[in-house]
Image (cartoon, grey):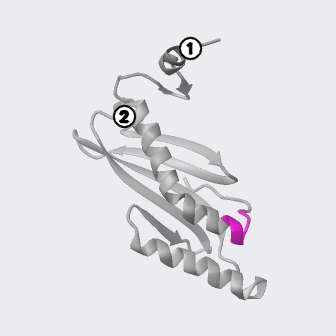
Amino acid sequence: MHTESECAATPYQIGDIASGDDALNTEAHGSTVTLTFDWNAFKFDARLDRESINSSRLRVICDIGSIPFTAEGAQRRINIMSILDATKSGFPIRTVISPQRRMQLIAEARLDAPVTTQNFITGIVTLVAKARPYLDLIQMIQQPTGSVRTR
């Protein structure tokens, strides 16, 4: 059995990203670190881009499915469009609609240097938590289907 302090100090690794106090080496990753994950039936892509010596931009993108046609349910379409309109007022969260009628929820934040693994993961969790009310509403109206990652 591990004590709480032992668990906190236990290193973890996700691909090339390992825990610790050292800054993430974005130079080794071409100035970009990416992480893909699934949560609550949604698929996410997180991307950390180094913008300068002093900061990096974290972007979390969630594919939330296709906009329903009116024939599939007029009220469902109206409800989805209302949720998408609500994101227009709130930075750091916004939505975009692709030419193929795919909806994406995008959350962004700036992280000060040095960006550690803990800062990176904490930033992702914080952005997903801020997006959760929108995701919960969308999930109530339509189940996510066939999420397509854009890379």
Q: Under tag 2, what secondary structure?
A: helix
At x 40%, y 68%, the residue is: 90
At x 36%, y 52%, the residue is: 109
| Dot 2 crowding, Cα within 10 Å, few <14, some 14–19, many 20+ | some
Q: Which mark is residue 49?
A: none
Residue 141 on the magenta segment: yes
Q: Please say whether residue 69 is visible from this viewpoint.
A: no
Mark 1 or 2: in front is: 1
Q: Which picture quadrant has residue 142?
A: bottom right
Q: Under tag 1, what secondary structure?
A: loop
> Counting residues from the N terminus, which is met first, the one under dot 1 or under dot 2?
1
**Residue farthest top in this picture:** 1
- Above or below: residue 40 compared with residue 27: below
Say which amino acid is labelled 2: Thr
| Magenta part of the chain | 139-144
Q: Please say whether residue 131 is visible from this viewpoint.
A: yes
- Above or below: residue 88 compared with residue 52: below
- Mark 2 = which residue? 26
How far is the residue under mark 1 from the one under mark 2?
33 Å
Say which amino acid is labelled 1: Thr
- Mark 1 = which residue? 3
- Are the two marked residues, 1 and 2, in contact with CB atoms closer than 8 angstroms? no
- Above or below: residue 132 compared with residue 30: below
Residue 18 drawn at (x, y percent): 48, 24
